[in-house]
Image (spheres, rainbow, N blue to C red):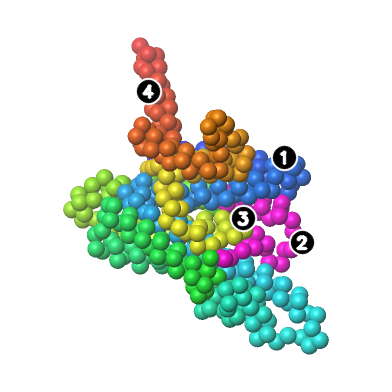
Amino acid sequence: MQHSFFARNPSVLVFVSLLALFTLGVTLLSEGMGADVISTSMIKTLGKTLCLCLVAIAMDLVWGYTGILSLGHFAFFGLGGYMIGMWLMYERTRDAVLASLSQATLPPTPTEVQNAIAHQIFGVVGGDSFPLIWAFADSLTLQLFLVVAVPGLLALVFGWLAFRSRVTGVYLSILTQAMTLALALYLFQNDSGLRGNNGLSGLQNLPGMTGVPQSLVSIWFLWGSALALGLGYMVAAWVVGGKFGSVLRGIRDNEARVRFLGYSVEGYKLVVFTGTACVAGIAGALYYPQAGIINPAEMAPIASIYLAVWVAIGGRGRLYGAVIGAALVSILSSWFTGGQAPDIDLGLFTIQWVDWWQVVLGLGFVLVTLFAPNGAGGLFDLITRRRVARAKQNSGEKRP
């Protein structure tokens, strides 16, 4: 007898149900829906947190299930943000330019409009024309395709070169970190075509919707982020719950034995590395319009290290653990760095959490690694095992 996907994976149904209830509750209490209990800034924080949970799931697939400690997945996250940011900035600037040129005596030509848009966008870095990479910036459909294609292509090329050479372990981690650093340093240059250190800004303003308040736009992005997270969680659970997932775990535990059994280890690694890069790109495309700005600093190697820390704290090898870790750290980070946590006066000096938060995060990572290697998700496993053991004991006592 075949069971449905949710019957075979009850935790997925629980997760999706909780996510739906969370989204509905936040929506009803939001400023955009009239209740005004949760502010618009908090709605954006929660929406961004859902995006971080999605990229954490991608990281868990590649590290927790396959054993590849990638320190470059946040670069794919940032590339997704850049791809959608190009369209948002182009269209927003285009609307402003058309409004300005409409007051001219003679109607502007298409060339004049394009030149004016390019000057507005690239004047800050001394440019006055569109680089080649902006060729499709006026097409939402193509830029959405590039959100997936650009991170996926970079991961495909990098993964093919690395995996065919059978680079593993810490050496592969160093290579992924080097890739991220090289990409960030390139984007810092003014002639990179993406405005250098200035990055892309004003992404929170949707083109053609200037009359729509941010309180409502934030709800739309919350819905989109929740939908992406729910679908991403289900797909990830389906992947790890089948034969493909068993092979991934085998590669993580004993790569040589899996290769001896006849499986294409490099092929499996390449598929999961490229697929999770695409997922990270989608998460970034939803995150940065809520953040409002993206610049190369977002793609620094430290960001990918943070991503690994989130997964470790939540519990790698557990999809819900990745979500718990990302959500916990994101919410606490917003609380500590947003000035909401009270400073602690110790007499000789005062602990200001804006400066000490990263110390606390690092200390938490060390403690989890030493004393709770299964992370926060391991607590759920412990509770579940105790319930199962108790149920078996009770059923045994009832037998004659």
Q: Is residue 43 magenta?
A: no
Residue 265 or residue 17, whichever sits in front: 265
The image shows residue 37 at horizontal and vertical percentages of 72, 40
Q: CA distance from mark 3 to mark 1?
A: 19 Å
Going from N to C along the chain, the mark reached first, 3 or 2, is 2
Label 3 amino acid?
Answer: Gln
Seen at 33% across and 54% down, the residue is 173
Pointer 2 residue: 211
Work out whether 302 lies above or below 21.
Answer: below
Q: Quadrant of residue 118?
A: bottom right
The crowding category of the residue bearing disc 3, from other C-alpha atoms within 10 Å (few below 14, some 14 to 19, many at least 20), is: many
Residue 329 place in picture, x, y as percent: 50, 42
Mark with earlier residue (1, 2): 1
| Residue designated by label 1 | 37
The C terminus - image quarter = top left
Residue 39 sits above or below residue 113 on the image = above
Near-viewer residue (301 or 254): 301
Task: Please give the residue where the numbered disc 3 appears in the rendered image.
Answer: 290
**Label 4: element kind:** helix
Stretch in magenta: 198-227
Mark 3 or mark 1: whose residue is earlier in sequence: 1
Label 2 Cα neighbours within 10 Å, binned few <14 / some 14-19 / many ≥20: few
> Separation of disc 3 and disc 4 at Cα?
45 Å
Specify the farthest residue to the front.
348
Asked whether the viewer can see residue 174, the reply is: yes
